[in-house]
Amino acid sequence: MQKYSVNQHLIETILAWVNSGEIAIPEIQRPFVWDGSKVRDLMDSLYQGYPVGYIIAWRNPNVRLRDGSLSEGKKILIDGQQRVTALTAALLGQYVINKTYERIKIKISFNPIEERFEVQNPAILKDKTWLHDISEVINGSVLKVVREFLKLNPEANEDKIEKTITTLVNIPKKQIGLIELSPDLEIDTVTEIFIRINSKGVVLSQADFVMSKIAADTEHGGNELRKAIDYFCHLVIAPDFFKHIVDNDKEFTKTDLFQKMQWLKTENEDLYDPDYNDLIRVAFTSQFDRGRLSDLVSLLSGRNFETRTFEAEIAKRSSATLKSGVLNFINETNFKRFLMTIKSAGIISPKLIRSQNVINFAYIIYLKLKDLDVNSSAIESYVRRWLVYSILTSRYSGSPESSFDFDIKQISHKPFDEILKEREEAELSEAYWNASLPQSLDTSVASSPYFHVFLASQVKAHDKGFLSRDILVSDLISLRGDIHHLFPKDYLKKNGLDRSRYNQIANYVYMQSEINIKVGNKPPRDYFELIRIQMQENHKQVTGLSTEQDLINNLKMNCVPTELMTMGIDDYQDFLALRRKLMCLKIRDYYHSL
């Protein structure tokens, strides 16, 4: 099957299609990121007759209207946005939205004597040998422009000036290549074509295609919805961007979408900072009971999966459903209560949850169960358990879309407690806690999800840092405290152990730096002897703990075997095995408490 057609079109034809909406610029790469010098260079290339590459458009399928007639699909620009936007700015004088979301004009000037382009600047505006804005020249009268220029520059060669200005005015008559992809292509194929053609090797995600579909759907307010998604994801990271929206996008501030996200102007929580990919995925999966974003692209195009036709009514309905999902996502109550639920599981920092897909699906569960009118306290427990279950089993690390699709369909057809019980029996059995998890803890990777779950269990239990009397593990995590070694690193290195052995997770503990300094590079039996002496003499040389029982309790909450107090280098491997077992027991009890 021929996947595309290639044709040459006049630039003015392409721009006319953009103005009429036949070509939609969806802002896949979003705001215009070229600086003025790149726009200038593009104009120079066109003036000189140099090729400027191809643009790629993907035609939406034709959709059937209620009256049975067909509406021809728009072309969606998927590569060449920056070039086409540059053309509309320079040749038509249109505004562009720059990377800081400001609405600006890029004015290109032309010197007919030197045949040189430049970005307009104050010096050029004072220089009579320059045409200050080529868009005014191209859209005006050539004769009038030539006559006025020669009047200001009588010494100029009349024939040359007429020739150069005519060449300038004829830039829109130059051709540009348009590769039009077949509407029948699947997203994966379109993505592959894009990557193969794009010299920079830019990878488009399926969320990019969704954003393009949304932006092109002006009939159903898709342009506003796309902007809302973009603005929300920007605000959640930088609340001070709120004022910029108010100052620069008056129209959007009048929409209900903007009203729903006003709470972000004072929000500084960074536990969950979703990007547009996350927001779309959560909104879609929670509302459509599907996990593959390619399905959303098809639905927004109006696809009827049963008849394999495209219908305007399905496109309209899908657009409204997606908007509901976006509104649910950005709703202040939903977002904040979801984060409170995550924090109540001891996950208080983004560094304790490295997989964005895990937290995305936890939010999907929260929104879905809320729609199903499940009891709020039950929702909180289910979200906490599924979140930790997902981390422990690496649920969404392999093929997240397939897992999302499978899980949401189960949730839609079966009580959630039954699903959870089945998963726990299959994947979190006693064999998991006693054999599989201890084996997973045999690693030197500090970013291990299993170690993060262990730390979350300590936060939830309000555990103190190792040898700390008052400082909580949660304080050390929140205030960027340091992870230290129970068997000091230098001590193990001096005894010939390599990095993979001395940096074992079972040798890690959150410890105040000042305590770690006092521990130094002594073997455990030596620094515990110092602690015993300080307790007997009632001074605080190493720790604030003052009694033997305080020490035992501190070791227990940190899953440190008491045998450590008498250990040296020969005991290191036994220590690791003992501590892994204790850590697994704590994680198991923590999970069941959720």
Image: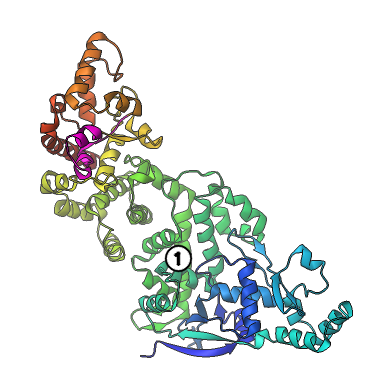
Give how far across and how far down residue 346 sits, in percent.
Answer: 32, 39
Q: Quadrant of the N terminus?
A: bottom left
Q: Nearer the viewer, residue 257 or 97?
A: 97
Amino acid marked by disc 1 = Leu
Q: What residue did someone put label 1 on?
A: 322
Q: Quadrant of the C terminus?
A: top left
Give how far across and how far down residue 143 sits, in percent.
Answer: 82, 87
Tag 1 secondary structure: helix
Give how far across and how far down residue 363 sits, in percent.
Answer: 37, 53
Position of 245 with respect to 382 (left or right) is right
Give how far across and how far down residue 329 sits, in percent.
Answer: 44, 55
Q: Is residue 217 visible?
A: no
Task: Rate crowding at label 1 as few (under 14), some (14 to 19) or many (20 or more) other CA atoms within 10 Å.
Answer: many
Q: Is residue 11 above or below residue 352?
A: below
Magenta stretch contains residue 148: no
Q: Is residue 363 visible?
A: yes
Position of 83 with respect to 449 (left or right) is right
Question: Which region shows up in magenta?
Answer: 488-511
Residue at image location 29% in from the left, 45% down from the top: 381
Q: Nearer the viewer, residue 395 or 566?
A: 566
Position of 126 with respect to 505 (left or right) is right
Q: Nearer the viewer, residue 461 or 319?
A: 461
What is the residue that sits farthest to the top in this orientation? Answer: 537
Q: Nearer the viewer, residue 559 or 379?
A: 559
Quarter of image, res 397? bottom left
Q: Is residue 533 above or below residue 204?
A: above
Q: How many marks?
A: 1
